[in-house]
Amino acid sequence: MIGAIEPVHQEANRSNSGGGLWDYISPSRLNTWMSCPLKFRLRYIDGIRSPTTPALFLGKQVHRGLEIYYRHRMLGITLEPNDVGGRIVDGWDAAVADEEMKFATGAEEVALEKQAVDLVAAYLAQVPADEPPPLAVEATMEAPLVDPVTGENLGIPLLGIVDLIAPTDNGPVIVDFKTSSRSSPPFEISHEIQLTAYSYMFRKLTGQREAGLQIRSLIKTKKPRIEQHEYAARSDQHLARFFSVIREYVDALDTGRFNYRPSWSGCAMCDHRDGALPKLGWLIRRKSPPVHAEPTNGLALAGVKVSRVIRGRALLSGGLRAFFLALTCRLTGDRRQAALFTGTLRKCPIVSTARDVANLASR
């Protein structure tokens, strides 16, 4: 029996009501901080919220449809796909208003609504007729963080919402739904924090060990596809890594250290690069990879601006290293070394914007 789990959106409610950093830790907060501490600061400390993208909005509506279906299954009622799709459509306008969604055209909104209905229908079409009712749906779990190795209570709870807990012959399985634009092979490390957090909370609240974990992906191809990836129950090594991340996270909160962490994938999709980042001293332009220009002494947050961002081709090997060194020396006031490294960069045959780099060292 999973009686200790509450099927309500407590995490969302607490976040929307301004839950402080020390009120709780959640998988979403941890993943945001791990991807970029500065992005975490902008969102959770400075309160700068990114607008809901069509892809994110679509994911929420798909989750809403699946929640409707499985809540009825818990009551012994099996809704037809058309019934679930109709409920998605009926609640669409209210969801658009709640999220303050802006669509470029009416046709874009209609297409997104149809895509949500089609994805849910494709998922329900492959659900076995004899699938047993779930043990919990959209279940909020909150548990104290007690290090399983040292026994230390960290004094802050872990909070999260699990999409589904399904019964199997081997025991309960924790299920997470995701929408994706493409098919992808099981890559456990990218989901490790979320899956381990769910496992930890489930064990703490129920006294049971999960039989496994699943990610059920709804693929947004022309003809929607469904993929199910299986993951083993969390091991002691998973939990040890999880708590090492949490300790680093808590240390960052203690020290107020939220550094910029560039990455090709994360920065390309970040809404802050054209908004908040330039105000903090970054000049990051679209169609150009961001440059890690933050000096360790925090000059960027004090208003020092990066004069140029090299555009165009990728910088490789020595060229990339010389650019970073020239930029760092320029920001720290060492013009002589900046000029030296800029000279090295000019010799790099793949750099087509040497004039921009020369200007960097001379300003």
Image: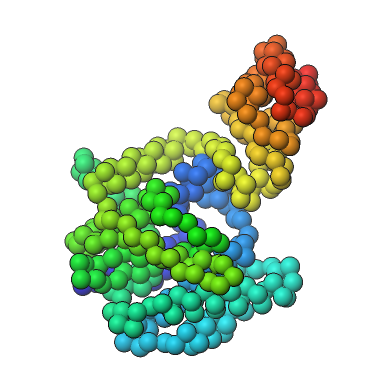
Q: Which corner quadrant of the image does residue 136 belong to?
A: bottom left
Residue sitting at 26 percent across and 56 percent down? Answer: 233
Return the residue found at the far top: 336
Image quadrant assignment for residue 273: top right
Image quadrant holding the C terminus, namely: top right
The part of the image, by quadrant, that contains residue 359 is top right
Seen in the picture, residue 36 relative to 81 is either above or below; the reply is above
Colour scheme in use: rainbow
Q: Nearer the viewer, residue 37 or 62?
A: 62
* Residue 297 visible in the shown view: yes
Please report the residue visible at 55 percent of the width from the left and 50 percent of the height from the top: 43
Query: Residue at position x 66%, y 30% from top?
Result: 315
Q: Is residue 125 above or below residue 300?
A: below
Residue 118, given in percent of the width and then of the height, sits at 54, 77
Picture coordinates of residue 167, whole percent (x, y) = 26, 72
Residue 198 vs 127, above or below: the answer is above
Q: How many marks?
A: 0
Instruction: Tell me where residue 21 appears, x and y as whole percent.
Output: 44, 49
Q: Residue at coordinates 39% horizontally, 47% vertically from top-left?
A: 189
